[in-house]
Amino acid sequence: MCNVAHEIEGFLFKGRDAERHFHETGRFDYVSTGGYYHSLPSDPLRQFIDAAAEAQRAMGFTNEKDHPEVAPSQFEMNFSYSEALIAADQFQLYKLLCRQIAATMDMTASFLPKPVVGINGSGAHTNISVGKGKTNLFHDKKGQDGVSKLAWQFIDRILNSGSDLCLVLNPSVNAYRRLDPHFEAPNQIKVSPVDRGSMIRIPLGNEKSARIEVRSVAPDANIYMTLYALFRTGFEGPESDAKDEAKRTRTRFLPDNIFDAIRLYKSREWMKSTFGAGVHEKFAELKLAQAERCPKALGTRVKAAEVQFHHEVTNQYLWNNF
């Protein structure tokens, strides 16, 4: 069984539809200037988190942690492990529910990966393990960092295709603002039990909780494509050879802009075989169309276009003006 649990971060901003009005103001307004575990009961961010968590539990989510995150007005609500497809459905439902709860409070829940430059962005850390019956196949008490040989093979294959996968895990122009090493961003193609700048982390675990954490997933990713790509690559992707291992001694980084990510995605046969030629080509075509509607240089200011054309469905009217 393929098991998944997500840690989805987001921001809460003043006013309804703040993203759609961004081109008018050029800014997002915080509802709270606190930080990690720094929100009192009467704080709007705390009230939103409590209301959203209550709604999630009423809908069958098994919540484990609900708290503000490190950046101002940032939140995270975690729910327990489930089978991969259920986890993907909950990922989508979680974001929809947060948006609706925020709207009732005259606020906006935003899942832009980096809506404000100069503070931490939002990720969707994806915890993965594989089980057979009640046995966690990623656990090995005597294994390196407490995980099994199967887990290490899974990690190796993902890292070997790290650059190729980047567009799937980070599909928007704005997502590449988040991959900034100054803000604990997972932009390094490596694995570590402690370094939060690594693409993959191995959290401390036991026979039940042993897992790997893919930290480079953005909250605006197509989670169905993401999970399929991660599991398919982890099980069947190309393994590293001696030449690849030599490269690992150097620090390698994920692409820092969507154009490089598109180029790498398009040029790799593994991505084409994973999704099929038709889907592979169409996905790259859509991502390029989105990218070309935005400034090519990210710069230090979030541009209106990268917010306006971020949500391809809700901005369909805008897209049709081209």
Image (tube, helix red, strand yellow):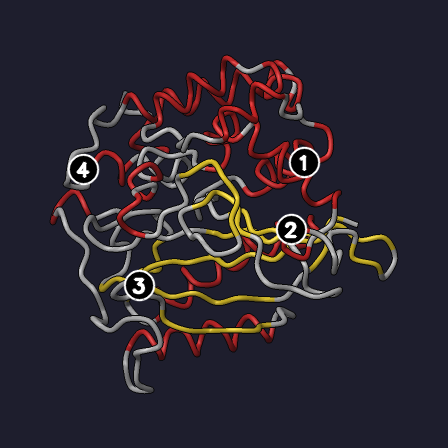
- Residue drawn at x 28%, y 71% is 35
Q: Which numbered dot is residue 303?
A: 4
229 relative to 197, above or below:
above
CB within 8 Å, label 2 to label 1? yes
Would you identify the image quadrant in which residue 159 lies? top right
In the image, what residue type sits under mark 3?
Leu
Q: Which residue is mark 3?
A: 12
Farthest residue in the right direction?
Answer: 133
Which of pointers 3 and 2 lies earlier in the amino acid sequence?
Answer: 3
The kind of secondary structure element at disc 4 is loop
- Tell me the kind of residue under disc 2: Ile
How far, Cα to Cα, is label 3 from label 2? 27 Å
What's under tag 4, amino acid-wise? Lys
Q: Which of the pair 95/149 is nearer the observer?
A: 149
Q: Which mark is residue 234?
A: 1
Q: Residues within 10 Å of mark 3 (few under 14, many from 20)?
A: many
Q: Work out whether mark 2 precedes mark 4 in sequence or the reverse, and give the earlier one.
A: 2
Observer-nearest of 155 and 1 = 155
Whether residue 219 is situated above or below residue 167 in the rendered picture: below
In three-dimensional space, the C-alpha distance between marks 2 and 1, rounded to whole angstroms, equals: 10 Å
Q: Secondary structure at mark 1?
A: helix
- In the picture of the structure, the residue carrying the numbered disc 2 is 128
